[in-house]
Amino acid sequence: MRRVAIIGVGCTAIGEHWDKSLRQLLVEAALKAMDSADVERIDALYVGNMMSGALQEQEHLGALVASHLGLRGIPACKVEAACASGGMAIHQAFLAVASGMYDYVMAIGGEKMTDRKTPEVTLALAMADDREYTIAVGASFVALNALVYRLYIEKFNVDQEDIALFSVHDHKYSVNNPHAQFKKPLTLEAIMNSPPVADPIRLFECAPIGDGAAAVILAPLDKVKDKENAVEILASTAAIDHLSLNEREDILTLWSTVEASRKAYKIARIEPKDIDLVEVHDAFSILGVLSLEDLGFAEKGKGWQLVKEGQIEKDGDIPTNTMGGLLGRGHPVGGTGVYQVVEAYYQLTGRAGANQVDDAELALTQSLGGVAGTSVIHILKRMR
């Protein structure tokens, strides 16, 4: 297996892009990444996306994007793993380079949601779970997370305000993120006064609907010329759990995250305490808390304490979601896992601006599909 590095990245701003199609967003991000990497051609392309068939009535995204990039002849395909599609696209690109099959590979992820009505998007998102059974009983994706949230509050005797602080944290950091969907801070009072979506989840504890695309270009480490602007991927792992909550022994443990991170730590030969910054998949505030626990940064039932005590601030013990996370930056579903890696890349190469974490050397990103039916973990290392 060859060592693999990220040599270029690119992304679009996240928001309501009424004037751009999914194709245009993906191509824009791809061209930015190719310019960043200073390459004119790539050997293979993996496109992370969840809902193009349902929302755009368009599949075959690999060929679509490659064709519009002028990359006729290369292998290209769509990668789908629900909300972890982008992370899984990077995982596949990593394997392609590490195996020696290809040298320069692009992983790109994106989603276009705002052109459709909210109920249509909600139905499409339900495909992240066993749609035939969950939707039939009225359990939307938000409702499934609400079940987890309610049980957590009751089992560990936690105030909801302490969990909602995760959203306050994310919006604080998205203010300084140039591609974030939300650039205004939120108070805890504003979050708790926002409309209920599925009890106990409030509106401002949910990642928004938005459009966007992000891309990374991977290459073998021995071909990297500009190490100042490259980041090594020490580990890329993935794992699944039983898809639906009712099949699991403990719905308060993101078992796929436990499994995938355990593998990643072993491959990278590190422990959680060695990580300098983290990007967790907080589509809902409760998932941020659970993720900190199941990645090994807090005991079960105590992840919220890291938030309340300021340990996840950029100058804290474990800086987390320092560019706004899903709640602040936004969550263009198929692109989110790639945005996380792009933002970790910015931190490790000293490009995070006002949100820069001092002397960051190791970063971890966690991408979830559904309620952690799939988890993808990447551990990145600064090369400069």
Image (cartoon, helix red, strand yellow):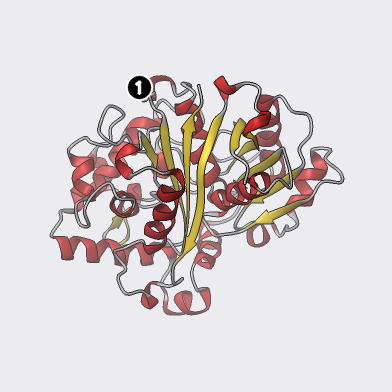
Q: Measured from the top left, where is residue 178 in percent x and y?
A: 49, 26
- Please name the residue shown 62% across and 53% down the image: 49
Q: Measured from the top left, where is residue 379 in percent x and y?
A: 46, 42
Q: Nearer the viewer, residue 202 or 68?
A: 68
Q: Mark 1 points at which residue?
A: 358
Disc 1 residue type?
Answer: Asp
Q: Nearer the viewer, residue 197 or 249?
A: 249
- Please name the residue shown 56% across and 33% down the image: 13
Q: Measured from the top left, where is residue 161 in percent x and y?
A: 19, 48
Horizontal relation, residue 180 to residue 7: left or right: left
User: Is residue 105 at all visible to an observer of this figure?
Assistant: yes
Q: Measured from the top left, where is residue 306 in percent x and y?
A: 22, 42
- Please name the residue shown 82% across and 46% down the image: 74
Mark 1: give few (<14), some (14-19) or many (20+) Cα within 10 Å: few
Q: Which of 119 and 159 is in front in this view?
A: 159
Quadrant of the rendered image containing residue 50 = bottom right
Q: Residue furthest right?
A: 73
Q: Which of 62 and 141 is in front in this view?
A: 62
Residue at disc 1, secondary structure: loop
